[in-house]
Amino acid sequence: MTQRLFTAEFVLPGHPDKVCDIVSDSVLDEILAQDPNGRAGVETFAPGKNTLHIGGEINTSAKPDIARVARKAVRDLGYTSATLEGLDSDMHVVDWIKIQSPDIAQGVDEGKGLHAEQGAGDQGMMFGYAINETPELMPLALSLARRVGLRLDDARQNGTISYIKPDGKTQVTLAYDNFGNPTSRPVQAVVVSVQHAPGVDHGQLVEDVKNLVIDPALEGLVTADTVYHVNPTGAFVLGGSAADAGLTGRKIIVDTYGSGSLRFPATHGGGAFSGKDPSKVDRSAAYMARYIAKNIVNAGLAHACQVQLAYAIGVAEPVSVNVNTFGTSTDGVTDDELAVAVRKVFGLKPRQIIDQLDLRRPIYAKTAARGHFGHEGYSWERTDKKDDLLKAVKDA
């Protein structure tokens, strides 16, 4: 039987782009902790030379200490050497934050602008996705790449591998059969690149990462033929923004679904999440779309599902709702019928989304670090709409 390959990657929280995502969301969390109705669109740039530039727009009664929040985030990520990692907790923070444009604010504030209701904070389309490849209804390739990456970061934090540094990436390649299903032992290749202290023997690093991280993380899924690439250039001493500038919003596929699965690709609308308060549908509607897709698959209405929501700035109702089950819907239910059921079961106006998912809380730095989907504890990962969806489909 022919094998077809599919790959996904994950980046560690200490990757320079992720550092910027986490700093942006840490600023957002500080604002929401002081002012749950605060608004923010925060962008961070890490050019190296022990400096962060933080800009964007806010509209809030909160008084966040931007520099203090940023330095704490960097310190918590394990950055200690500006020479080797580009940053340390004594870094210079350049604050470019400005007040939100009143033209945008009037479209979001209830009772202002052309529409009375709270409208979307921007135009655009957002996608949510779920697939029954894993218990958390996430694509298997991304789940495994993330599993390796988070175990690697844990090994740094708990001292299991004492000489590795915060920056790094992981990548997992899976084999699928002719029907598009992962094979029983699907891992064909694993790539790990992780920053390390000077003078570390490459052979020792390969052995430690393979034995203490990769094999335990992927137990039962590798074969004798699985290919391992650990720091394949031979050395990774200079890392973080000392080696590669970081910027908020450059890891949107890692943040979401890793492009999905072999048979059922996942689409991205293009908007990043980090630094954006939930009035911005780039974030909140993407969370709602995941909530919808996960409940559809959990209800047994499809094996895989992608939901698209689209909005116009300042307008509350979505301009479109689309459900795509890739031909996997069950019991003769059509995608159009599912879209009608979705409108009945879920409130899709920005205010409804914020209230249903309880999004005015300081919860976002964690999502930036570990991935926005597929983790227990997030409100958009609940599967509590199964019965409502089944009833809505039956009554259609």
Image: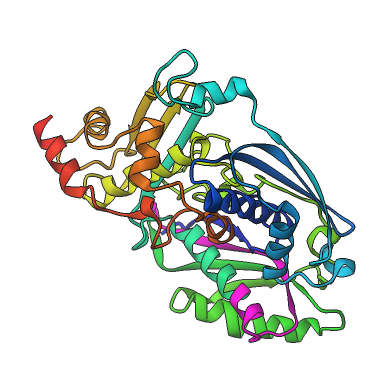
Task: Place residue 41 in its image quadrant.
Answer: top right
Residue 238 magenta: no
Which image quadrant is residue 140 in?
A: bottom left
Residue at (81% x, 58% y) in the render: 241
- Residue 35: percent from left, percent from top: 53, 46
Residue 254 in the image: above or below residue 326 = below
Q: In this view, does 354 lie above or below 195?
A: above
Residue 301 seen in render: yes
Is residue 191 found left or right of 200 in the rendered image?
A: left
User: Does 87 sit left or right of 228 as displayed?
Assistant: right
User: Is residue 14 found left or right of 7 in the rendered image?
Assistant: right
- Image quadrant holding the C terminus, namely top left
Nearer-the-camera pick, 377 or 303 = 377
Estimate the x, y position of residue 395 in percent, counting from the top left.
Answer: 9, 32
- Residue positioned 84% across, 71% down in the render: 81
Q: Which of 315 and 102 is in front in this view?
A: 102
Q: In which quarter of the image is the N terminus?
A: bottom left
Colouring rule applied to residues: rainbow
From this view, report whether residue 314 is shown above or below residue 60. Answer: above
Tally the marks. Answer: 0
Task: Name the residue at 52% across, 27% down.
Answer: 124
Q: Percent x, y for residue 149?
A: 59, 68
Residue 179 visible to the viewer: no
Farthest left residue?
395
Q: Is residue 365 above or below residue 41?
A: below
Residue sitting at 41 percent across and 46 percent down? 263
- Read off the magenta span: 153-180
The location of residue 209, given as percent across then percent down, is: 65, 80
Q: Is residue 158 magenta?
A: yes
